[in-house]
Image (spheres, grey):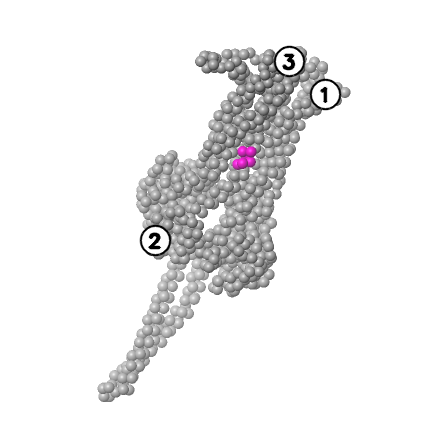
Amino acid sequence: MKNKTYMKASLREIFYSKGRFIAIVLIILLGTLLYVGIKATGPILNHSASRYVDRQELSNLQIISTGGLTDTDEKLAADIPHAEAESGYQLFYADSEKNQVVKLYSYNQDDQQNQLIVKSGHLPRAENEIVLDEKAQAEGYRLKQTYQIDQPDQLTRKKFKIVGFVQSPIYTSTDERGLSNIGNGGVDFFAYLPEKNFSSEIKSVIYLRFDNVKGLETFGKDYEEKMDENINQVEKLFADRSKERGAEIRESAEKELQPKKSEINENLAKLEAGQKELDQGKAQLQQQAASLPTGNPQLEEAQQSLETQQKELTANREKLISAQQQIKDSEETIAELKEPSYTYDQRAENPGFQEYGDLSERIAAIANVFPVFFFFIAALITFTTMTRMVEENRREIGTLKALGYSRFEIAIKYIIYAVSAATLGIVLGSVIGINTLPRLVFELSSDRYNFPGVEAFYLARPIIQAAIAFLFASLGAALLVLLRELHEKPAELLQPKAPKPGKRIFLERITPIWSRLSFNQKVSYRNLLRYKSRMIMAVIGIAGCAALMVAGVGLRDSLSSVGAKQFGPIIDYQGIVTLDDQPDTSAVKKIFAETPQITDQLAMLNQTIELKEKGQANQKLTMMVPSDRQAFKKYVHLKDQGKRFSLTDDGAVITEKIAEMFQLKKGSTLTVYDEDQGSFKVTISHITENYLGNFLYLSKDYYQKARGEDFVANSYLLKSQDMSQTAEKKLAQQLLSSEQVTNTSFMSTQIDAQEHSMDNLDGIVWIFVVLSGLLAFIVLYNLTNINVSERLRELSTIKVLGFYDREVTSYIFRENVVFTLLGIICGYGLGIGLTKFILDQASMESIIFPLVIRPGAYLISGGLTILFTVIVMATTHFRLRNINMIDALKSNE
């Protein structure tokens, strides 16, 4: 009966202190929601993407060769361990009338990989049917229209009927379609047409799907490690194919030339025979001319005929000699042909695929810091609240102990209270967090990706971590205080704690200030320092929430500032033109001269190089060597701790992220590997500031000295006035049409891509800000509520002494203002440090995020905290008006 009554009293405690109970539940809920939800967002996004590409049988690897792929390549692919191979065609088609570049793929209904998703219509059923990218609908294409492709050398027909619009798992992005080597250098959309329409026997691509990575997360380490093993096996099998294919191409070309060469030689032999006959005819005519009179008409006619024949024979000989020279030139060209290269493209090379993976990585990096800090503040406030609750019940504990209740029986009440609050908060936070945050993040970026949605699932690890932390914060706090209180005797517990003695404060020693303060102000300031622990906890709680809001908005400012810090302050050119092998640079310069927006250009050597070191993953970066190091200063602004410097002839300049990864300093020696794995060494003369990408800069003279070979430019950097997208496309098309250029890329495209990528994180940032603001409100409410509850006798006393309701509220409000202002100031400093720490964690191999916190972050953080303080004090005012002074003053009796 005793225990039953006590259990009822324990449950009644929750009802009587429902405000405090709800506050604890909400704090735990918010902490768990953000921690578990954000921790789960990256894995859930990755898992959902993996399940989607697995359902659509997206190939794990694409083998592409610049020399095409033959039956030999297909047979080799069939022998790759754990792999299913399918071959197909793909080519670029430039529609000059519509200024569009389309990537054409072959469609075979028997193929299993890269399954298309039909958005409208149906897949091709007849040879004259075609399906287009759903993006093509924005260009005005409709079902049942005729689509014409003028590619007579590669396709057997020109006209096709549009029967459907589709999505392809090859394209993750809704907008990006990759680059092309024709037209304006970009792809507008893709199309699939039946394989039988392609006339060539040489295939373009081999798709590989590996059994040993099925079910693995595409963006996970296990998948990457398995794929590295698979690619190594593929590279070993195809190791000799580059040379073999080069020999096949040369042999095939020589076979094509042989009949023409034989024909020319035969015709030349016939000409020589004809010349002999003609010479004999001339000799005979001269003999006859000796015996005939001058002016004989028959003789003149014969001479004219011989002269005409001689002219024809000479003209034919010149044609044959010219053709023979062409054959000779072709033979030399064939002999100098480069061996075709084989590339092995993983899913990450598919347009938009890596960007989606980067989004998940950045969320994961942020999740390692921001939610943990949020979680810490929530746990700290929970701990404080539970501690104060137990301390308030000293007399009740003393009474129960005097009545013979055991320590465990007394503790049960607080265990039930703490476990109930923690369980409710953890369960609700986990369920809401996992089912809302990943979906919300996905919805905020869903217009950028073709994935249908997310498949939420519960991750045990963050839920268990949250449960342990909050059970410790709630239950642990209660038990720690109970252990201390239960060691005291009942008589001591039944007596109220002696109030802390008042002391002179430092401000009292400053007479000019202290003397000008009112009585109420003096009391408030004494109370602040009298209850130091209360002040410290209030300031920590408010500072933590203010810091979270500063960090939330600061993250957005910093992430969105990458492009602004890189393009202009560092990279100050507007385009890069990549040249073909042995180009006619005069033709390219002519186009530059005819384009009024181009103001300057600089010849460069650009190469992709690789750095290798034990214990460190291989890193690729761009090596840039300008033809004129003085002119280079106008195109790239090299900076070391904000100070500008120039390239020198005694060392190389490397960007800071690579220097940090490989622990490089000024004077360090670095071994560099080129695309053919040839190596050379450079000395680092400077480390330069950089935010996007990784670069190694060398002067022309130092390059020739370090490399031991002549400088040969393979690109141009362009400086230009502002160009519209149409003007950029026109210039790119002109340069590609010159057949001297392989690619033209503009910085505007990179800037747009960077902004596009950073926009994906806006949703996450605002989630942080909103939840941090909500936590700040609950923390302020809870701390104020505890403050009032602990001081009911004090507040009742001053009301009895004649203080008006407004003065009683001001008594508390004045303290809260000080707490709030101190918390905001500390929160600003803490927020800057927190933002810097998160950015360091979120930075990747090719991106450094600058620390940029605009004034708006401080205004939002401080403004919301002050607003919440005012709202809390308004609600507190009504509570203080209704204090039962007699009950409060009799409470110690």
For the C terminus, the image quarter is top right
Labels 2 and 1: the sequence-earlier one: 1
Which residue is drawn at the image coordinates 59% and 41% (left, top)? 439
Disc on res. 422: none
Which residue is drawn at the image coordinates 48% and 62% (left, top)? 151
Q: Nearer the viewer, mark 2 or mark 1?
A: 2
Q: Spatial distance from mark 2 to mark 1, Cα to Cα?
A: 93 Å
Label 3 sits on a secondary structure element that is helix
| Front-lying residue, 875 or 737 | 875
Report x, y in % for residue 539.
53, 23
Q: Main secondary structure of the magenta part?
A: helix
Q: Which residue is mark 1?
A: 6
Local crowd at mark 1 within 10 Å, few (<14), some, or many (≥20)? some
Mark 3 residue type? Leu
Report x, y in % for residue 749.
45, 47
Q: Which residue is mark 3?
A: 889
| Front-lying residue, 434 or 135 | 135
The correct choice, above or below, for 641 with respect to 752 in the image is above
Which residue is drawn at the image coordinates 62% and 29% (left, top)? 26
Q: Nearer the viewer, mark 2 or mark 3?
A: 3
Position of 213 with respect to 654 (left or right) is right
Q: Quadrant of residue 786?
A: top right
